Amino acid sequence: MTTTLTDRPARARERLRRDAAHVLLTNWTGTSTVPSHTLYPHQWSWDSAFIAIGLRHLSPRRAQRELESLVGAQWADGRIPHIVFNPRVPLGAYFPSPDFWRSGTAGRAAGAPAGTETSGIVQPPVHALAAALVHRRDPATSRRRGFLERMYPRLAAWHDYLLRDRDLTGHGLASVVHPWEPGMDNSPCWDGPLRRITPAAPESFRRVDLAHGDAADRPTDLDYGRYVRLAADYRDRGYRDAGTPHPFAVEDPGFNALLIASEHALAGIAQEVGRDPRPHRERSEALTDALVRHLWQPSAGMFLCRDVRADSVIEDRSVTGLLPLVVPSLPRRVAETLLDTVTGEHFGLGTTTRLVPSYDLRGAAFDSARYWRGPAWFNINWLLERGLRLHGAVSEADALGRAVLDAAGDSRFAEYVDPYSGEGHGATRFSWTAAVALDLLAADDTGEDDR
């Protein structure tokens, strides 16, 4: 698939590539890559997937190692935890720290690994897609190292966990049980379900994140207290998913769309390692059908989240409802409507914004600077560039790819940016921002998109 992503001259592209590579190399710890040495000094699950996608253009072997180190902390029940803690980092450098999660004791019944401290919740399942792309970059090295042979059973177990233990409604979709799990921590979509949660006492935790970022850009203390309460209660139940109703449970379209895309990728991985790909193809089709049947809202022109506890649709328009564009077998009428919504008044791509915001531009809760309540995120826009291209919106994908590269370079690889101005917020020299920039540059250099 031919791509033309940037109008930058060759010298500027090379400078951007060099700067992005430097970010990933300096954030490498020897076994994995931190998102940021200041704000996020450990290994994060979906960050590592995007980082591996970029790293494959610098060192396919290191990209493989990135994913291998993550799945090395997988629990026996199949879950891949959202944080793998580096024991060399002081406890006070990040909260919630290992002594809060207590994976070795509280998670013992669920199969938390001995000797490795992790969190007990998860993040979006983009890992099989990342593994397939890493393999594709250098198949010879991948096969020589047995990369996919070792990854396949781990990834299959991860997907099994989500569809066995997290199908809380019988819809055939995975539910998230904490706002950190879909990766969009303080999205306005969670405001309603979170009102049911009594926050933890302020004196029971210390917000290290505020030492590295503007409080106006971060979740509020009230929200954070609710996050802590939910995580502590889940821990105190031994991280069990069955038997006790989750006080926060949501069917999230973006989380499930990434699971579908990864099931498609896992089918290809299965075929590569001599396993039967049909179960993964069948499951991806079943998941796609369930996603459309239960979360597609034609009146909104997009997918919406469902509050499992209240058994009701969450009316807020979030970018998570556009992520099903990465699903290959999305019905044409649904894909065409999503393409209209991306460029329409609620997200404004190509009209009022150059990057897709994380929340409805016209929503009452929109905030262009506060975390997931409006700013544009680079990993999400990388996914949407891929989805636009997949469904034939090539010119829109090209324009979005150019905008991602421009904003990444201009913001010094910021964690996220204002969708209107491109002003950077959060940490700078952020790993997944650099990684997706490298991937887009590589596609543009060759003229062929291997993604």
Image (cartoon, helix red, strand yellow):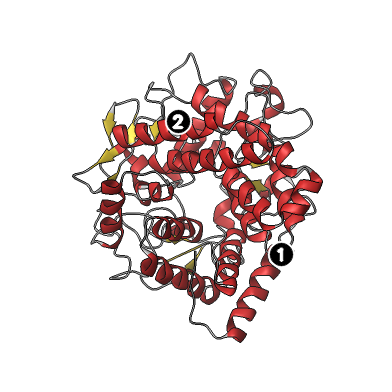
Q: Residue 401: percent from the left, percent from the top?
A: 46, 68
How far from the left and from the top, in percent, is residue 406? 49, 75
- The relative height of residue 314 versus residue 395 in the rendered view (above or below) is above
In the rendered structure, the answer to whether residue 343 lies left or right of residue 224 reads left
- The numbered dot on residue 174 is 2
Q: Quadrant of residue 269?
A: top right
Q: Residue at x 80, y 54 (%)?
A: 30
Report the disc number at residue 334.
none
Specify the quadrant of the image occupied by residue 121. top right
The answer for how far apart the CA atoms under marks 2 and 1 are is 34 Å
- Identity of the residue furthest to the top in this view: 243
Element type at mark 1: loop
Where does residue 321 sit, x and y in percent of width and height? 35, 46
Instruction: Pick the residue in front: 133 or 221.
Output: 133
Residue at position x 46%, y 16% from top? 244
Using the image as rendered, state which of residue 150 and residue 253 is in the foreground: 150
Which badge, 2 or 1, comes first in the chain's sequence? 1
Residue under pointer 1: 58
Q: Quadrant of residue 63?
A: bottom right
Nearer mark to the viewer, of 2 and 1: 1
Quarter of the image where the C terminus is located: bottom right
Disc 2 crowd rating (10 Å Cα; few below 14, some 14-19, many 20+) is many
Instruction: State whether residue 236 is above or below residue 330.
Output: above
Q: Is residue 34 visible?
A: yes
Amino acid at circle 1: Leu
Find out whether the residues at labels 2 and 1 contact each other: C-beta distance under 8 Å: no
Q: Residue at x 31, y 50 (%)?
A: 335
Q: Give the secondary structure at mark 2.
A: loop
Label 1 environment density (alpha carbons within 10 Å; few <14, some 14–19, many ≥20): some
Decide if residue 194 is on the left or right side of residue 30. left
Q: Is residue 76 above or below residue 219?
A: above
